[in-house]
Image: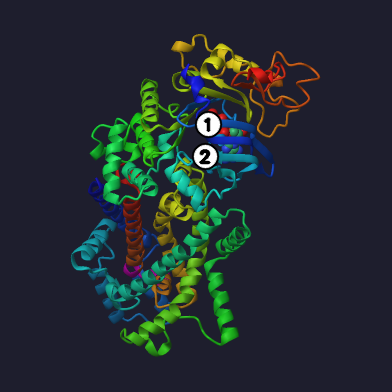
Amino acid sequence: MTAAVKKTDTKLIELSNLHVNFKYRQGTVRAVKEANLDIFSGESLGLVGESGSGKSVTAQSILGIIPTPGEIAEGEIYYFPEGEDGKRITLSDLKSKGKEFRHLRARKFSIIFQEPMSALSPIHTIGNQIIEAMMLARSVNKKEARNEAVKLLRKVGIPKAEERIDEYTFNLSGGMRQRAMIAMALAGEPEFLIADEPTTAIDVTIQAQILELLENLQKDFGMSLMMITHDLGVIAAVAERVAVMYNGYIVEKAFLENIFNNPLHPYTKGLINSIPDIKKTDRKLVSIEGVVPHPYARIKGCDFRPRCEKSIEGICDQSFPSEIECEKDHFVRCYLYNELEDDKK
Amino acid sequence: MFFDYIVRRLLIGVFIIFIISIISFFIIQLPPGDYLTTYLAELSAEGQRITPAVEQRIDALRERYGLGDPFHVQYFSWITGIILRGDFGYSFQWNSPVSAIIWGRLGLTLTISVSSLFFSWIVAFPIGFYSAVKQYSIPDYIFTFFGFLGLSIPNFLLALVLLFLGYQQFGVVFSGLYSSEFAGEPWTREKFVDFLRHLWVPVIVLGTAGTAALIRVMRNNLLDELQKPYVMTARSKGLSEFRLLLKYPVRIAINPFLSTVGWMLPFLLSGEIIVGTVLSLPTIGPVLLESLLGQDMYLAGSFVFLLGVLTVVGTLISDILLALVDPRIRYD
Ligand SMILES: Nc1ncnc2c1ncn2[C@@H]1O[C@H](COP(=O)(O)OP(=O)(O)OP(=O)(O)O)[C@@H](O)[C@H]1O
Ligand SMILES: [Mg+2]
């Protein structure tokens, strides 16, 4: 299995005990809690979870673009630049608006957002915005940047790119807009691309095309891809490894096959069971009993306990379970499982 | 597309001006009687005998200006006079053609109003920007406090307070637009410098409330825009924060700011009428008031009409500016 080889690949990003809080007068929203996650060079990782589970905030914290008043309250984010053996940059220590972090965002990291209509400026042409990204990432002049931008637009499948480059977003279709957004994200030839629900706002018929495009581009550019979605169909199509988030916690991490064939966490099981047939579905995750807790709520014990059929009194209501490796490369945060013995790892 | 847009706006503007001309002519005809009856009444109130010579003159005037004619005939001769000959009619009070009275005064009124507009913009833009970017900071609270103060103090009161303070503290009279020795003199460099020295008082008095309103507009617009996803996109590209703010959210937040010309101009013009009267400026303020009181219909009507035209022109300018900065309007 090729996926298993990936694990030995070089680490690109590491989240270590990451906490992200939004502090308000009414209370603190703990958007990400105790998150540990590795992202390897060239892999595609799926981050899945219900609305409000903290997927976007996790992504924003890696890029240093958490909106105020959000901030990293605890923990670290590391970046291991490709081709610079052993070098480690602690992103969480950098000033998010400082020069060093901005250069990394311009040249190494990129993100594609859910709604290209609102994520692109309504009063600048797509060319203007792509050329800007290009010039921030590489030392090219405006003319070269424009030529490159036209090429890039062609590459992402925009016909008549040399004309479309001067269009405004409101003159493009949803699919074309998202392609333009993708072109912009690729302008700096990033090592790490985050796609935050890139197909949610797009016509169903175009969704598959966009996903395929992203997959191909990831291979072409040799990037790492973090695909954020609440659609298990997207995960099945794109991801090699999966992390499942629930209410700010990463509750399960494993290779794709293990997540689908042997889900461990009751929440993951619920997700999988809510899909009648994985192969032909792209259904939203709506059919688990109960609702996500209120953002300000503090739950004693496991956050999933109120919705969990298997919760054990006296155990699950004490504290949130810590992360255990239950089978090789398969991590879960749940009291129902025991740690794999050391020699089997 | 841009051309179509402007042509459409122009046509609408012309139509509105036409309506304004009818309405302003109608309004000044509303009170019973006309200037001549008011004049006769005044004469007899002063105990003067109305000689046949006076009566004859009055009849001649009535005849010449068709004061006895029906509304549409009077209106038609007035408006064709304006369009064809630039003749706005005759001021009975001043015994001179209206056009000889209005242009100089209208020019000064416009100068003061437009200066106030720029004053408001220049002051409100950086303050609104700062208040939004540093929302809930101490300076933001201070600006907000003074903003509300500025909004709630009436113009004329501010004018009176400035007049009083100027006189009491410095022995200076802040009224007029130039020192007495320049009154009636042609414009020279010295007169212009003297004019600028006087200009700031009415500009500040007039501009204060508008500035306060504009600060709120700028702050709120920018706060809205700062939440928008495209700001995060720009950050994700590694653009520096200041450049990013200016290129994206500010550019978009500035649109409603520009469109304020549309409502600021009429607001300033009517404010100027009151302030001009209080500060006794050689602008249209004092004259308009008198002409309305004395039913000097052509003078009053022309002022009302031209103020309306200026408002329409202001709106037109702001529409064009808007279309220049915002492609969404151009392509509409
Ligand atoms: N700007 C913000 N201010 C306050 N709270 C926020 C902000 N952004 C996110 N949060 C909170 O952080 C938590 C996680 O939000 P996040 O956007 O990461 O969820 P998500 O998993 O991406 O959901 P979705 O699928 O709806 O995009 C939520 O409780 C949300 O209310
Ligand atoms: Mg999200």
Q: Which of disc 2 and disc 1 is earlier in sequence?
A: 1
Residue occupied by mark 1: A39
- Locate residue A254 relative to residue B300 in the image: left or right: right
Q: Is residue A112 above or below residue B260?
A: above
Task: Measuring from the top left, give residue B198's x and y in whole percent.
Answer: 45, 80
Q: How far, Cα to Cα, is label 1 from label 2? A: 10 Å
Instruction: Assess disc 2: are there few (<14), some (14-19) or many (≥20) residues with their C-alpha within 10 Å of its C-alpha.
Output: many
Residue occupied by mark 2: A80
Residue B246, located in which quarter of the rendered image? bottom left
The stretch in magenta equals B291-299
Q: Nearer the viewer, residue A234 or B191?
A: A234
Task: Measuring from the top left, give residue A209's x and y in whole percent.
Answer: 35, 23
Q: Is residue B127 above or below residue A81?
A: below
Q: Nearer the viewer, residue A311 or A297?
A: A311
Label 2 C-beta lies within 8 Å of the nearest ligand 1 atom: no
User: What chain does mark 2 sit on?
Assistant: A
Task: Measuring from the top left, give residue A298's x and y in whole percent.
Answer: 72, 31
For the question of whether residue B184 can be seen, the reply is: no
- Locate residue B75 relative to residue A238 in the image: left or right: left
Label 1 C-beta lies within 8 Å of the nearest ligand 1 atom: no
Residue under the point 32% across and 75% down: B104
User: What chain does mark 1 sit on?
Assistant: A
- Our reading of the magenta stretch's main secondary structure is helix
